[in-house]
Image: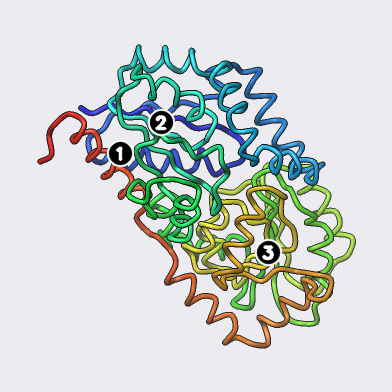
Amino acid sequence: MRRVLLLTASTGGGHNSASKAIKDALEKVNCEVLLVDALKFVSPTLDRLVSGGYEKSAKYIPKTYGSIYRISSRKSRKKNLDMIMRQIMGRKILHLIQNKKPDAIIGTHPFPMMALMKYKENGTINIPIVSVLTDYTAHPAYIQKNVDAYIVGSEDLTYLLKNSGVDYNKIYPFGIPISENFLDTSKVDDVKKQLELEDKFTVLLMGGSFGAGNIKDSLLELLSINYDLQIIVVTGRDYSLKEKLSRMIDDINPDKIVRILGYTKYMPELLTISSVLVTKPGGLTTTEAIIKAIPMVIPYYIPGQEAGNVDFLLNNGMALKTSGTYTLSTLIEILIKNPERRSEIVERMLKKRKLDSAAKTADLVVKLIEEKNGNKD
């Protein structure tokens, strides 16, 4: 049986989600998969510093996070960052590889990839390495000359990577991997009944897995819209925000249906039910919206990779973004009063979505392993 080492990290939800989808797909093609959170494996303290630091900075000081992201994007900084990751993570992950003897390595986060590239370059590691980008942009940290294949979210990324010096033949625009269960609609009616929702224009308001973004102000603005719509709010794991919003709704007693949820396993159903998604554009959230073909309105985003996701969505006509002129309430009213505008966005998303990325990624990994082992049948 082929053995694959799958390296992820818990900086945001997208890396782990993509990893789990790939793991499921690999197991279906008879691969044994070792899924490892690289930061936690190397050091729980390192994980708390990096993952916890990302979450807190993205949520509370996003401009500072954006500045750090931009500085780290400079080519002059890349060699230093590679060296730091190799010194911090390289030796321990190398020992894991030598112990488990995988036939291939997949990374959904750049840090472990950076740590391993020197070993691939000098021949210490001599197996295929596949890098999966979980945003619709390409931070230089992902660009490593010894990666055998890049899985990217769209054909647009092919040109970004190519212009950054990546061999065109190594780039596979399969889409960001997502669970095949995401298209299952069998529980939609049950969720609708459970939440006591009606058949009307529905706004889904989110702020990411840890509640980033000014959800409170966005909710108040949605409540001010003079139209019979219903609102679903998902605060993720920010349960204090959930309680705060619930109390606010109780005090206001609005004339609209409003449902406040924390973390939920029913995101596929909520996206199917909703008419528009108001959220920050994380890589996973953006992919889920495109898969479900639900138009996005972006009132806030974390500077850094999410700025690249905004560019991707706007350049492809799949989202609207608020500004000083176009407020959230204005954009929602535009979509309500002009259903053809919403339909145009839906059509673009249907053309752009990738439904089988995880399966294609698994097939490619198997192909690379067989080619490495001299079995091309």
* Residue 112 sits above or below residue 195 on the image: above
**Lateral position of residue 285 relative to residue 333, left or right:** left
**Lateral position of residue 225 relative to residue 352, left or right:** right
* Residue 315 sits above or below residue 107 on the image: below
Horizontal and vertical percent position of residue 24: 35, 40
Which residue corresponds to mark 1?
26
Horizontal and vertical percent position of residue 196: 63, 66
Residue type beneath disc 2: Leu
Please tell me which residue is depicted at 35% across the width and 16% down the height of the picture: 124
Q: Nearer the N terminus, badge 1 or badge 3?
A: 1
Which residue corresponds to mark 2?
6
Check contact, mark 1 vs mark 2: CB within 8 A: yes
Horizontal and vertical percent position of residue 147: 39, 35
Please tell me which residue is depicted at 82% across the width and 69% down the height of the picture: 221
Q: Residues within 10 Å of mark 3 (few under 14, many from 20)?
A: many
* Circle 1: element type: helix
